[in-house]
């Protein structure tokens, strides 16, 4: 098991290196000139030239990529003399659009995304797994049919549209809640809750739908396994069989998908954040797209990739614990 | 005739083996939801295909401005967004364009993107998945690592981030400027990130298929890899592929509308549901009806595809009719 974990982590690091290379090259090959975007429309050519040198865009692509990688571990200094500034490690570059180190920007916006993701994730796992379990235990009865209708509707609703409808109806037409304006939970907890409740619910209910199906099908499949037959034959109580054998087996695919979904969210819940005006990483990415702020895009892509790859490793390890058969292989 | 007679061997109604395909079809045609959903999809496809005909018969156009249908503030005259005998679903605020006409032209755009993206994704995923599963060894490893890298990218972020530069690149390569280039980009980028999911499933299926007797028989009689992959393996993969297709198409339709809504997909004056939704948000206070029409159209189509996909998957699953122990 230990060697398995070490191998997985090593492989994950190689994968991240590959992703960083592709990301950097992909964005560097875009037609826009990052140096020209450092100052407004009426920029003098010599300022652009100076910025180009200062931000390192005068160097070759491979050299730029090397400096980017080095910056992650050693921090990075830009320019010399009075105009110099530096981004301490781990540096993901410097945003000329917002005149700030990318790492600082991510550190500012990440908590919002994290609160949104964690809250929604807890809610959706609760809703999804419980409705799925109820459906499986009442297969073919009205509970099962209700759960299947919930699933079919839930997976078909586009997040941006439902988010908008919920926002308009609750905030503007019914005026139950004030217009969302984000505040940190440590500054103003009631406002934080009032802002987050709608995005949490929308994200959770829509995402829960596919987990309902996953749980239901996983449980029904597990109920047909030989080990359940053995449990029944041995005279174990249904409760015990469900908890020890059925749920444990049904959880394996759920853990996999939940891990990846959660990681995907942490990289920026782009649509939810845009609809509910939450100043998270997703919203920052959209702004960076509009402003062609390449360093921010490279940075958020890298952070998102780190989450996805880490989740993959954790899921693989969790697999080994949940399903002993994986360990044997 | 008694029940016993039905199962006796010399009766004309003797039990006949049913092929998996027949069993699946029998299960599917018992599923009323699925049949309704298939009806909905066929209707959408017909309406989308015949949009110009329908519009000319009704004398409406998705682009014609109708100032008479608007009041002094540029909002539709009459209740519910100006619904009338002339404009069945009302008119667009600001321009007075007919919403019904735009809706059925929007179906064209949305379905075109969905169908082409699904086709491309499936074709690429199918070929790569079969090759990886059949060849195994280093080919499989290389393809596997490539899939790992593709999956490690935050795809939606990249789709958004690369929209503008890649659309420009496409235009410089000779794709007609504007919406054709934008549409091409969406289809290509969805396929770029989507093939992995198809390839993964197909590879798994191929790994088990290649050990079967018919493949061995083909090999023994000297068939080339090419023959085995295309003539022996691919025809046996239709079941998982059909499920993937029917479940990924609605996802692509929804993604197109999301992108157009964010202003990164198709653009005015083209009609697509995403464009209409993005536009209607600006009038949510004055004309809420407009907000609901394209949204409902989108949701009904997506739901129909999902229902059919689920039904096909259930129908193809031999375990569907099994009784449970608990």
Image (cartoon, rainbow, N blue to C red):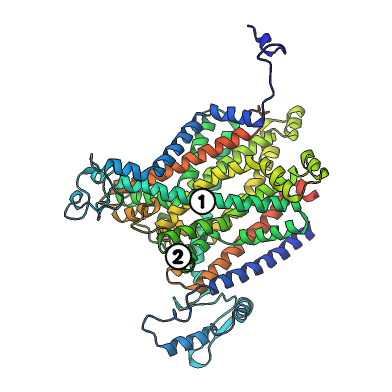
Residue A8 percent across, percent down from the top left: 73, 61
Q: Chain of mark 2?
A: A
Which residue occupies the foreground of this view, A221 or B293?
B293
Which element carries disc 2, helix, strand or loop?
helix
Q: Residue at x 47, y 53 (%)?
A: B255
Is residue B192 shown left or right of residue B33? Answer: right
Alpha carbons under labels 1 and 2: distance apart: 27 Å
Question: Badge 2, how many Cα within 10 Å: few under 14, some, many 20+?
Answer: many
Q: Does residue B163 appear anywhere in the picture? A: yes
> For numbered disc 1, what is the local secondary structure?
helix
Q: Nearer the viewer, residue B75 or B23?
A: B23
Quarter of the image where one finds residue B2? top right
Q: Residues within 10 Å of mark 1 (few under 14, many from 20)?
A: some
Q: Chain of mark 1?
A: B
Q: Position of residue A49 (x, y in %)?
A: 47, 88
Tell me if residue A45 comes above or below residue B27 in the rendering. Answer: below
Report the residue at 40% width, 55% height from top: A194
- Extreme residue in the left direction: B72
Q: What residue is pinned by disc 1? A: B116
Q: Establish if B63 lies above or below A85.
A: above
Q: Is residue A35 left or right of residue A125?
A: left
Q: Which mark is residue A286?
A: 2
Q: At which x and y percent is residue B169?
A: 49, 68
Q: Nearer the viewer, residue A50 or A234?
A: A50
């Amino acid at each position: 098991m230990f060697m398995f974990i070490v191998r997985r982590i090593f492989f994950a690091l190689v994968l991240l290196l590959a992703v960083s290379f592709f990301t950097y090259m992909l964005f560097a090959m875009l037609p826009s000139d990052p140096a020209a975007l450092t100052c407004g429309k009426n920029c003098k050519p010599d300022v652009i030239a100076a910025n180009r040198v200062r931000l390192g865009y005068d160097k070759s692509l491979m050299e730029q990529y090397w400096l980017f990688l080095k910056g992650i571990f050693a921090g990075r200094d830009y320019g010399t003399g009075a105009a110099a500034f530096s981004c301490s490690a781990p540096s993901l570059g410097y945003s000329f659009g917002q005149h700030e180190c990318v790492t600082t920007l991510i550190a500012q916006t990440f908590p919002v995304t994290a609160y949104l993701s964690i809250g929604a994730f807890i809610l959706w796992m609760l809703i999804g797994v419980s409705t799925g379990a109820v459906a499986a235990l009442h297969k073919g009865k009205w509970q099962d049919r209700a759960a299947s209708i919930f699933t079919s509707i839930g997976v078909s609703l586009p997040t941006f549209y439902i988010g908008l409808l919920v926002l308009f109806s609750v905030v503007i037409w019914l005026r139950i809640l004030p217009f969302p304006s984000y505040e940190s939970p440590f500054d103003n907890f009631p406002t934080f809750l009032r802002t987050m409740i709608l995005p949490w619910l929308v994200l959770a209910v829509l995402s829960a739908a596919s987990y309902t199906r996953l749980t239901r099908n996983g449980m029904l499949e597990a109920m047909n396994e030989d080990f359940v037959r053995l449990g029944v034959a041995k005279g174990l109580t249904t409760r015990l069989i469900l908890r020890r054998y059925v749920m444990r087996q049904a959880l394996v695919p759920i853990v996999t998908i939940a891990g990846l979904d959660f990681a995907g969210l942490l990289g920026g819940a782009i649509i939810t954040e845009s609809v509910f005006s939450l100043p998270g990483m997703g919203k920052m990415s959209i702004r960076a797209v509009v402003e062609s702020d390449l360093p921010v895009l490279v940075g958020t892509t890298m952070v998102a990739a780190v989450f996805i790859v880490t989740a993959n490793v954790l899921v693989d390890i969790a697999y080994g614990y949940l399903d002993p058969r994986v360990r044997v292989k | 005739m008694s029940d016993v007679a039905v199962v006796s061997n010399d009766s004309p109604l003797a039990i006949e083996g049913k092929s998996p395909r027949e069993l699946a079809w029998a299960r599917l045609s018992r599923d009323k939801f699925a049949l309704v959903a298939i009806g909905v999809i066929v209707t959408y496809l017909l309406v989308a295909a015949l949009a110009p005909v329908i519009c000319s018969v009704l004398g409406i156009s998705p682009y014609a401005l109708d100032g008479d249908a608007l009041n002094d503030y540029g909002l539709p005259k009459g209740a519910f967004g100006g619904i009338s005998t002339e404009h069945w679903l009302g008119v667009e605020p600001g321009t007075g364009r007919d919403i019904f006409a735009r809706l059925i032209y929007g179906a064209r755009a949305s379905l075109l993107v969905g169908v082409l993206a699904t086709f491309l994704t499936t074709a690429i995923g199918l070929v790569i998945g079969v090759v990886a599963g059949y060849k195994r060894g280093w080919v499989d490893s290389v393809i596997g690592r490539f899939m790992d890298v593709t999956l490690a990218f935050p795809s939606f972020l990249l789709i958004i981030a690369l929209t503008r530069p890649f659309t420009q690149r496409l235009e410089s390569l000779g794709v007609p400027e504007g919406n054709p280039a934008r549409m091409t980009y969406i289809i290509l980028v969805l396929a770029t990130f989507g093939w992995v999911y198809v390839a993964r499933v197909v590879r798994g299926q191929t790994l088990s298929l290649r050990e079967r007797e018919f493949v061995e028989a083909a090999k023994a009689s000297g068939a080339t890899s090419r023959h085995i992959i295309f003539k022996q393996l691919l025809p046996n993969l239709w079941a998982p592929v059909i499920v993937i297709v029917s479940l990924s198409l609605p996802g692509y339709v929804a993604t197109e509308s999301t992108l157009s809504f964010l202003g990164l997909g198709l653009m005015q004056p083209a009609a697509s549901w995403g464009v209409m939704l993005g536009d209607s948000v600006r009038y949510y206070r004055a004309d809420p009806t407009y907000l609901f029409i394209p949204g409902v159209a989108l949701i009904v189509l997506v739901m129909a595809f999902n229902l059919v996909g689920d039904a096909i998957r259930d129908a193809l699953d031999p375990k569907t009719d099994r009784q449970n122990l608990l």
